[in-house]
Image (cartoon, rainbow, N blue to C red):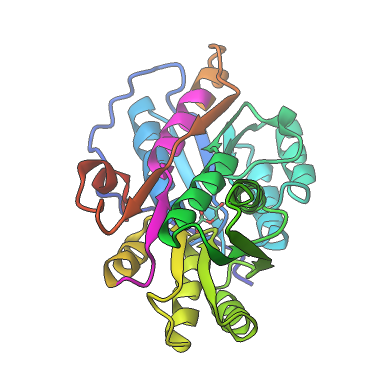
């Protein structure tokens, strides 16, 4: 059973310098455990982590589960903890289920940094760096409301119940969409991070609600599947889609008109900040416990602007 993939991201931004700027953290070891392998969001974050670690003279070993699943991520955390790296940077795939293995890793001597997703109890973590996902969900609601002229039916595709980012985006969206009296929320459905499931959710929802006006897809795989579902039903462009993330596939979908807006996160910067805070913690310097990072809403009209271009993921 191949539980993990060790990957070195091919980062377009990777620097060549190896001179440590800090002797005190030089040689310290970080293990990075993203939510899933082959995901442009985490690959971009890995670039930020590698670049910043290199500057500080630290090393990074990345171990990624094959799917976004706590039962696959747990053995990876356990194997990493057994090697006692100085720190583990991790995106927990479930806010509850990943707490015991990460607590054990901390007790075994590794500092824990949470990146992207979080835990129900963050007290075990040195730092937690992520998008403000509730605010991002609310921004998605505003973007979708604008696209559908503030009226009609909307669907949420939540990518995974129990993953903090999915839950918070869904919640932020649902609270904000209530502020539009002309909009009816037909409810949220979960695609388990599987684009094919998102496509079938969209087809089934269109069968029940042929007048569906909009979809909020809470991550890149939900958005990919939503676009496929609309294509299969001949509804591309008739149903407006706000997707999350800004990898190459998402940009292509935006350009093709399959998706009308993207909520781009700052994965590279999340990685950089997490390494900085872990380095502070390992050297007894003051640490920022929680760092929220922002988002940029990108439409076809704004895609060429520098702020949008800068927000695209670096894969
Ligand atoms: O949306 C990101 C990430 O923030 C989320 O926690 C999981 O899905 C992504 O990695 C995109 O696929």
Kindly indicate the quadrant of the structure image that contains residue 115.
top right
Along the line of sight, which residue is nearer the eye, 191 or 152? 152
Label count reads 0
Is 199 above or below relative to 300? below
Residue drawn where x is 46% and y is 41% of the image: 60
Quarter in which the C terminus is drawn = bottom left
Whether 253 is among the magenta residues is: no
Residue 147 screen position, x and y as percent? 41, 59
Q: Is residue 159 visible?
A: no
Residue drawn where x is 53% and y is 15% of the image: 283
The residue furthest top is 285
Residue 90 screen position, x and y as percent? 59, 43
Residue 123 screen position, x and y as percent? 73, 28
Whether 260 is among the magenta residues is: yes
Decide if residue 172 is on the left or right side of residue 246: right
- Which portion, as a residue range, is magenta? 257-277
Q: Is residue 243 visible?
A: yes
Kindly indicate the quadrant of the structure image that contains residue 114.
top right
Decide if residue 283 is on the left or right side of residue 92: left
Quarter in which the N terminus is drawn = bottom right
Residue drawn where x is 53% and y is 52% of the image: 141
Is 119 above or below relative to 215? above
Along the line of sight, which residue is nearer the eye, 20 or 135? 135
Along the line of sight, which residue is nearer the eye, 101 or 241? 241
Along the line of sight, which residue is nearer the eye, 74 or 294? 294
Residue drawn where x is 33% and y is 23% of the image: 20
Decide if residue 221 is on the left or right side of residue 17: right
The residue furthest front is 182
């Amino acid at each position: 059973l191949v539980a993990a993939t060790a990957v070195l991201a091919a980062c377009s931004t990777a620097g060549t310098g190896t001179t440590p700027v800090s002797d005190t953290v030089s040689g310290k070891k970080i293990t990075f455990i993203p939510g899933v392998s082959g995901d442009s969001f985490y690959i971009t974050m890995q670039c930020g982590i590698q670049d910043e670690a290199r500057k500080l003279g630290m090393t990074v070993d990345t171990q990624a589960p094959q799917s976004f699943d706590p039962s696959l991520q747990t053995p990876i955390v356990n194997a990493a903890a057994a090697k006692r790296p100085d720190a583990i940077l991790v995106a927990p795939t479930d806010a509850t289920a990943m707490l015991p293995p990460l607590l054990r890793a901390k007790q075994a001597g590794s500092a824990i940094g949470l990146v992207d997703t979080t835990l129900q109890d963050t007290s075990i973590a040195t730092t937690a760096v992520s998008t403000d996902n509730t605010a991002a969900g609310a921004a998605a609601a505003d973007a979708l409301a604008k696209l559908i002229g503030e009226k009609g039916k909307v669907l949420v595709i939540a990518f995974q119940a129990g993953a903090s980012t999915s839950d918070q985006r869904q919640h932020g969206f649902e609270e904000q969409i209530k502020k539009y009296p002309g909009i009816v929320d037909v409810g949220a459905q979960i695609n388990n991070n599987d684009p094919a499931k998102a496509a079938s959710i969209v087809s089934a929802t269109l069968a029940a609600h042929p007048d569906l006006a909009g979809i909020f897809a809470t991550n890149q795989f939900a958005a990919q599947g939503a676009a496929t579902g609309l294509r299969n039903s001949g509804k591309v462009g008739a149903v407006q889609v706000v997707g999350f993330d800004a990898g190459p596939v998402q940009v292509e979908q935006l350009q093709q008109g399959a998706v009308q807006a993207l909520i781009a996160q700052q994965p590279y910067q999340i990685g950089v900040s997490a390494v900085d805070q872990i380095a502070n913690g390992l050297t007894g310097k003051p640490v920022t416990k929680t760092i929220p990072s922002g988002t940029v809403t990108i439409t076809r009209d704004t895609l060429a602007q520098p702020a949008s271009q800068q927000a695209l993921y670096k894969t």
